[in-house]
Image (cartoon, rainbow, N blue to C red):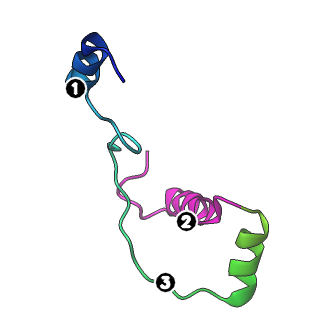
Amino acid sequence: MSTPEWREKFSDARVRRGRPPAELTKVSTTIRLDADILDAFRAGGAGWQSRINAALREWLRNQPTNPKQG
């Protein structure tokens, strides 16, 4: 059984679960991709969705009409 000292410490401790909140959150969406494109990204293993996001961001960065460029 815990001593009163430890019980007090545990009762005062803040519980933190999961990741800390991100500054920029992502939006869940549905997108249709060609099977070969999806297979290629998935073949790279975990993080395939983040790699698709990075590829789209790079494409957007290279667009001449992008108002966020620069």
Mark closer to the observer (2, 3): 3
Label 1 sits on a secondary structure element that is helix
The amino acid marked with disc number 2 is Leu
Marked residue nearer the N-terminal end (1 or 2): 1
Q: Is residue 8 left or right of residue 20?
A: left
Q: Residue 70 location in percent, x, y?
A: 43, 44
33 shown above or below 17: below
Q: Residue 57 location in percent, x, y?
A: 52, 59
Residue identifier under label 2: 56
Marked residue nearer the N-terminal end (1 or 3): 1
The amino acid marked with disc number 3 is Ile
- Real-space Cα separation, disc 1 to disc 2, in angstroms: 47 Å
Q: Residue 2 location in percent, x, y?
A: 34, 20
10 Å neighbourhood of mark 2: few (<14), some, or many (≥20)? few
Q: Is residue 45 left or right of residue 69?
A: right
Q: Residue 38 location in percent, x, y?
A: 68, 79
10 Å neighbourhood of mark 3: few (<14), some, or many (≥20)? few
